[in-house]
Amino acid sequence: MLDTANKAVVRRYYDEVLNQRKVDVLDQIAVEDYVEHDPFPGQGNGLADLKARVAALQHMFNPLRFTVEDVIAEGDKVVARNTVTGTHQGEFMGVGPTGKSVTYNEIFIFRFADGLVVETWGVVDVYAQMKQIGVIPA
């Protein structure tokens, strides 16, 4: 049952927070001292930084859409594999907006305590992002 509840929280994160842009939902699904093991350069941890990271990502690749491909749970962890699409509309890794469309993959591991996300680890295909916005030759 816990696996099912935690998976529902992860799906809610992608659906409501990322796709529907309801950043305040994070107050209901993550702890105040949340830890992101792979934050954007210059960003730290905590709920406020998570909200800032989500807002920045939504600005960088707008419109931004996450399609959840797989959700797997075991114990206190949930893994989500996603396909992400967007249009490069804001500065990303020092690169100004190009207006180019991107599609990339990512995998995130969410750790839960008492039904809330306490930390995540992520692997994002930044190479595909950089190639599609023209930083790396095709």
Image (cartoon, grey):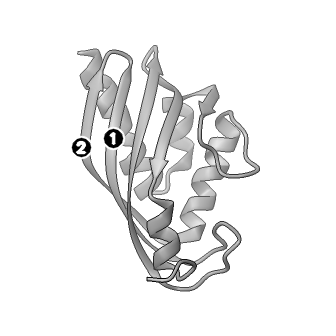
Vertical arrangement, residue 124 with respect to residue 126, above or below: above
Residue at (61, 29) in percent of width and height? 34
Please tell me which residue lies in front, 32 or 74.
74
Q: Is residue 15 left or right of residue 42?
A: left
Question: What residue would you read off at disc 2?
Answer: 70
Residue occupying the point 42% across, 42% down: 13
The residue nearer to you, when weighing 65 against 24, is 65
Q: Say which of 19 and 34 sits in front.
A: 34
Q: Quadrant of the C terminus?
A: bottom left
99 lies left or right of 115: right
Quarter occupied by residue 37? top right
Mark 2, other Cα within 10 Å: few <14 / some 14–19 / many ≥20? few
| Mark number, residue 34 | none
Side (left or right) of 91 relative to 19: right
Q: Secondary structure at mark 1?
A: strand
Amino acid at circle 2: Asp
Above-or-below relation of 77 to 97? above
Upstream in sequence: badge 2 or badge 1: 2
Q: Position of residue 18 (x, y in %)?
A: 45, 53
Q: Position of residue 121 (x, y in %)?
A: 50, 36
Q: Which residue is mark 1?
A: 80
* Above-or-below relation of 12 to 117: below
